Amino acid sequence: EKKISDIVRMTIADAGNLIFCVAGNRCGPGEPTCSDKSTVATVEAYRIGKPDKGWLNIATLPGPPRGWIAAACAAGRLFAFGGGYFDLSSGKQETRRSVLAYAFEPRANRWSQIADLPTPLSGADAVAYRNRYIILIGGCSVTSHSVFEPSLGRTVEEYNDIVWVYDIREN
């Protein structure tokens, strides 16, 4: 049986009777947690009213496999925004951020592309407000800059203070 602990840097969203685990990184012991081989586009749902049924695999998130996605549920749909992925086109692994955004309709088991984000974004949080608005908070964007983190002994991306609001009725 799948365990949610098998995935890191994923996003959890609650749709009332379903809890979604959206994309992220899946790796085994000793494997890097951030690579083109560990990043997944799988989406799983847990049926709260039927815990004996376990996790349900649903339609894969469109676009490149990625983690650090912002996701929230409103009006019975799941919304997923941005995320980080790995590009190998230059011959080496480069981290990229996505502008892609999608809405998932559970009854149809189908994703639809919605308006792109204004700028690439990963690592943001999302929350639904009044069952109509998705508020995206923070994350790393193209305006983020790198800072040296002494406790880690390496350079990391600094999170920003951007807040965006997506209106699910107006797209």
Image (spheres, rainbow, N blue to C red):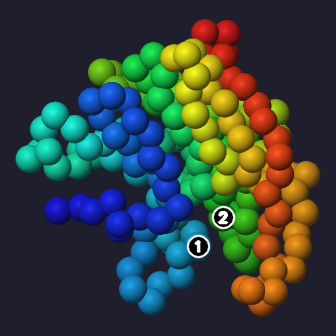
* Of labels 2 and 1, the one closer to you: 1
| Residue 105 screen position, x and y as percent | 40, 23
Q: Residue at x 49, y 56 (%)?
A: 10
User: Which is nearer the eye, 92 or 33?
Assistant: 33
Q: Residue at x 72, y 31 (%)?
A: 116
Left or right: 101 with respect to 92?
Answer: left
Q: Residue at x 78, y 36 (%)?
A: 163
Q: Secondary structure at mark 2?
A: strand
Residue located farthest toward the top when viewing the structure as drawn? 169
| Residue 159 screen position, x and y as percent | 79, 57
Q: Quadrant of the N terminus?
A: bottom left
Quarter assignment of residue 4: bottom left
Q: CA distance from mark 2 to mark 1?
A: 9 Å
Q: Which mark is residue 105?
A: none
First along the sequence among labels 2 and 1: 1
Q: Is residue 88 above or below residue 119?
A: below
Whether residue 89 can be seen here: no
Q: Secondary structure at mark 1?
A: loop
Whether residue 154 can be seen here: yes
Residue type at the position of mark 1: Cys
Residue type at the position of mark 2: Phe
Badge 1 is on which residue?
A: 34
Cβ–Cβ under 8 Å for marks 2 and 1: yes
User: Which is nearer the eye, 99 or 20?
Assistant: 20
| Residue 114 screen position, x and y as percent | 62, 24
Q: Is residue 7 above or below residue 56?
A: below
Badge 2 is on which residue?
A: 86
